[in-house]
Amino acid sequence: MSEAQKVESVNEFIITGRLPGLNQYTNACRTHWSRGAKLKRAIEEDIGWHILAARGAGKLRPVHGPVALSIEWHESDRRRDFDNIVSAKKFILDAMQKMGIIPNDNREYITAISDEIVDDDKDFVVVRIYDVEE
């Protein structure tokens, strides 16, 4: 995403803790379809609470046009693979849509997503939303 595409504003939220990776979600789905659905619903509900907190604090607002996302995945250890970690963006996008932050998570509204994994002492995820000029 080029700097010309970004409009500077604070529009972000933080998800505390570690989101399940693709391996954990796949294992739940293989056990029974309802376990996968239950896990997805619980993850999205948890993310929804973080979205509400950020909105209440004035750090997050709904967007109506196309946006680019920057996601920082802070991990306290190096055991999980990159692709396993970033697969949780599906849960993030679905929760953002359900909570009314984005109108839809299709390519009309999400034009780019950049991922960065940061080795840290704690597990958390920072999601930044940038308006994109059409």
Image: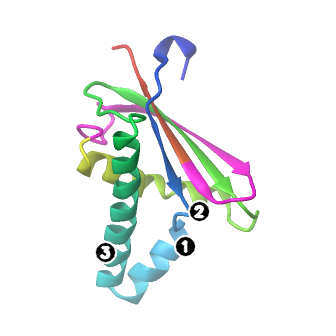
Up-down relation of residue 12 to residue 66 (above or below) = below
Q: Is residue 71 left or right of residue 62?
A: right
Q: Which mark is residue 3?
A: none
Q: CA distance from mark 2 to mark 1?
A: 7 Å
Quadrant occupied by the N terminus: top right
Q: How is the image coloured?
A: rainbow
Q: CA distance from mark 1 to mark 3?
A: 15 Å
Q: Residue at x 46, y 75 (%)?
A: 26
Q: Which residue is mark 3?
A: 37
Q: Which mark is residue 84?
A: 2
Front-lying residue, 18 or 25: 18
Q: Earlier in the sequence, mark 1 or mark 3?
A: 1
Q: Which residue is mark 1?
A: 23
Circle 1: element type: helix
Question: Residue flagged by tag 2: what amino acid is it?
Answer: Asn
Circle 3: element type: helix
Q: Residue 95 in the image: state x and y as whole percent.
A: 33, 53
Question: Residue flagged by tag 1: what amino acid is it?
Answer: Asn
Q: Is there CB contact under 8 Å for labels 2 and 1? A: yes
Q: Residue at x 52, y 68 (%)?
A: 20
Q: Earlier in the sequence, mark 2 or mark 1?
A: 1
Image quadrant assignment for residue 79: bottom right
**Mark 3 neighbour class, 10 Å CA radius: few under 14, some 14 to 19, many 20 or more:** some
**Mark 1 neighbour class, 10 Å CA radius: few under 14, some 14 to 19, many 20 or more:** some
Most distant residue in the bottom direction: 31
Q: Which residues are magenta?
A: 101-125
Question: Residue flagged by tag 3: what amino acid is it?
Answer: Ala
Q: Residue 114 in the image: state x and y as whole percent.
A: 56, 37
Residue 112 within the segment the image draws in magenta? yes
Residue 49 within the segment the image draws in magenta? no
